[in-house]
Image: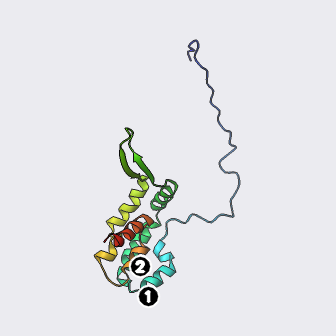
Amino acid sequence: MRTVPNEEKRTVAVAWRPSSQTHEVLNQAPPLTPYDVFCADTALGEAVDREGGGWGVNRLRDAGALAGTPEALEHSERAERNEPRLRTHDRCGHRVDEVELDPSWHWLLRQAVERGIHSLPWREPRAGAQWCARGSCSCGARSTRALCAPCR
């Protein structure tokens, strides 16, 4: 290694770890994934049946299976960690009023839109449609849907 005069010398410290396995952990539940979120929610299944939403059970099972995948749970955790941020002005001082969302928010909302869940009560105004949409959709899509009725 060549040393240049007046160059700052740097050292890097590395934390010492005896091993990645220190002991057997017995007091933690095993990982939850993959699992079917809809089939695991007995109360939701009963509400869908009671309110006449049996026609949407296949859609709910599809969304429930997706929601329990490691990918969906990772996006969900990331979206929760990175809350939406309001940007009122751009770098030049012009008013923009934009909400910046983490890419995981977009991924979760895209899953709801691709399955038609975000607008289900209006596209298919049948008994239980509200429960089918509620049971298979992320909070962001539910919030968007909730704003539609007052705006009409």
The outermost residue toward the left is 123
Give me the C-alpha separation between circle 1 and circle 2: 10 Å
Q: How is the image coloured?
A: rainbow
Question: In the figure, is residue 69 to the left or right of 13?
Answer: left
Q: Which residue is mark 2?
A: 131
Crowdedness near tag 1: few (<14), some (14–19) or many (≥20) residues, C-alpha within 10 Å: few
Residue count near mark 2 (Cα–Cα under 10 Å), binned few <14, some 14–19, many ≥20: many
Q: Are marks 1 and 2 in contact (CB under 8 Å)?
A: no
- Quadrant in the picture for residue 131: bottom left
Q: Is residue 98 left or right of residue 45?
A: left
| Rendering quarter of residue 114 | bottom left
Q: Which mark is residue 50?
A: 1
Q: Identify the element where label 2 is drawn.
A: helix
Indicate which disc residue 127 carries.
none
**Amino acid type of the residue tagged 1 in the rendering:** Arg
The residue lying at 31 percent from left, 80 percent from top is: 125
